[in-house]
Amino acid sequence: MTAPAFVPEVLERMLYWIRERESIRRRKEAGEPWPWTSDRLLQEWRWCNVRRMDDKVSRELMASWYRADADVSTQMTAAVLARTVNWTAALLDASSGLPFSLDLLPQIRARLHDRAERGEKVFTGAYIVPGQPGRSKVDTICDLTEKVAARADSLCAPTIRDTWANLLELEGLGSFLAGQVVADLAHLSLGKAWPDRFTWAPVGPGSARGLNRLLGRPLKRAVSQAEFDQLLPHVMEAFASDAPEIWIARGLSFQDAQNCLCEGDKHERLLAKEGTVRARYAPPRAQQGLLLEDNRAGSTPNLW
């Protein structure tokens, strides 16, 4: 496929977001005080990391939820449950703080119900978790995980793409959620044999909008998986050539490029005042007054 012509201004803003977001991560992890950037949009809103596995939930899941020595059924089921709930506190509360195992499924169902009845948070606010009419969301998700446990061997395929396609056959798992599941599995023993685990990613609503922005197309234009497969390598090349110290040195993947398209779309929306996004960022408690004082002083946002 001939290399696409990206809109230069949009590409530069996405490249800027990538460089600045990664700089924020490094400064934060180095223990520097907040704010880690002068960009008010990146200060005030919550953003995913450039590398998906640097995100808080991903780190927590890898540290406490997944078992490195688990079998295929356990890893597959753990990933589906993890990403349909996507709230580590709820998961570890339901498992009594233990890594996931299949024999914990009845306890997890009961304790998630208890948590919901107490009015405590069970599911992520990051995206929409599907439910079934007439059934609680907890039962819907737990039923799904039991089906996965029973069919895990047939769901797991020799490639990440084929495993994702198999997951789409399950009611309740669309392209985005199935993509989140296989993205986790790519870092577990189940997925480490996939030859395409770092060179393929599924299209999602946000990454489709981000790609359309890059190409100067209408935002609501449909992007098929086949078209995304053709265009994402060019996006990856553009991102990596601008900041090889981020993309090549850290071994970032097509999943990370897909993630940056989604966050790039969010950044464009805020810049263009097309609406708000999901969540504001709450700075460390000891420094929360800094933003309030700055706002009172009437300072103008620094977007660049």
Image: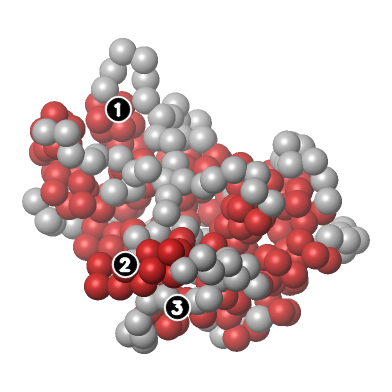
> Dividing the image into 4 quarters, which one contains the N terminus?
bottom right
Label 3 belongs to which residue?
36
Q: Nearer the viewer, residue 32 or 242?
A: 32
Tell me which amino acid carries mark 1.
Lys
Q: Which residue is mark 2?
A: 288
**Residue 10 in view (yes/no):** yes
Q: Which residue is mark 1?
A: 137
Nearer the observer: mark 3 or 2; the answer is 2
Q: Residue at x 24, y 40 (%)?
A: 122
Q: Residue furthest top?
A: 134
Circles 1 and 2, Cβ within 8 Å, touching? The answer is no
Residue farthest to the front, as pictured: 297
Which three-letter amino acid code belongs to the residue tagged 2?
Gln
- The vertical placement of 112 against 228, above or below, is above
Q: Is residue 243 left or right of residue 94?
A: right
Earlier in the chain: of badge 3 and badge 2, it is 3
